[in-house]
Image (cartoon, rainbow, N blue to C red):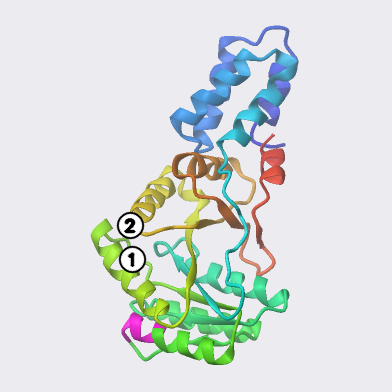
Amino acid sequence: MGLFGKIIAKIKGTADASTADWDELEVALLEADLGPTLSSEVTAAARAARAENAADAISQILRASLSSKSREILRTDSGPCAILIVGVNGTGKTTSAAKLAHYFAKQDAKVLLVAADTFRAAAVEQLRTWGERLDIDVAFGGDKADPASVVFDGAQQSMARQDDFLIIDTAGRLHTKDDLVAELGKVKRVVEKVMPVREILLVLDATTGQNGLAQGKVFAQAVDVTGIIITKLDGSAKGGIALAIEKALDIPVKFVGTGESIKDFAPFDPDIYIQGLL
């Protein structure tokens, strides 16, 4: 049963839900990482509705909390365009870059991956391994190569190949805002010498809860994040973080990862997501 399922059933089964029932609902929302503001709003909306309408009241406020911005991937009318994949180490950033490339490749798009997280040798090897497994080319440099240099070479290669997408796995170190602006800004400027950067997708781990929201705020302040990829969104009680992020940042979740398999990756569907929670 979904996040709110048991509680809604309990509320609907009573003529007048008790204070304890409503407290139980709000605690469940907090534990699901909706955050105090949204948890309070959802509880208040449910309390204001009749018991038999509690599910509808909750559904309406959840939908209103989601961003109204497009969840489609932005691209150019012709020629390659770049997508920067950003986020801290451990969120599934490199794997998400590979899964996104596979998603486009299945739609007959030409894709080139760029291993620009050169500060972590394991990230380069990880992306190269994914590329071999998925039969997708990966551009990379030497040990500790300058990320901007790797990205520039990759962009030129992608332009020559006339790819549809250039997907760049950027460094995953958590910096101050100033450091983020400097490093990611440099990468973006280098790419834009060759082709437009249409998306900056931030990867967040659903299981990190409110810490993920804090990361989102740092990156959103540092760079123009256009969309979010949430990993480990497996239907557990922590799934509420997608709502909290969209309400707080007004940045749309565009893709979700629900497991380790390459198949466990798909565009975010708000209707299915809310239905699952309810």
Percent across and percent down for residue 83 are 50, 70
Label 1: how many Cα within 10 Å (few below 14, some 14–19, many 20+): some
Query: Which residues lie in the magenta part?
Result: 144-151
Point out which mark residue 36 bears: none
Question: Is residue 23 shown in magenta?
Answer: no
Percent across and percent down for residue 36 are 44, 29
Q: Secondary structure at mark 2?
A: helix
> Quadrant where the N terminus lies?
top right
Q: Is residue 176 visible?
A: no
Toward the top, the furthest residue is: 16
Question: In the displayed structure, does residue 17 sit left or right of residue 224?
Answer: right
Q: Where is 87 relative to 133, above or below? A: above
Q: Is residue 156 visible?
A: yes
Question: In the displayed structure, does residue 15 sit left or right of residue 137?
Answer: right
Q: Residue visible at 56% across and 14% down?
A: 20
Q: Which residue is the site of mark 1? A: 173
Q: Residue visible at 69% across and 34% down?
A: 278
Point out which mark residue 222 bears: 2
Q: Image quadrant of residue 177?
A: bottom left
Q: Which circle's residue, 1 or 2, is located before the other in the chain?
A: 1
In the image, 137 versus 232, the foreground residue is: 137
Q: Image quadrant of residue 193?
A: bottom left
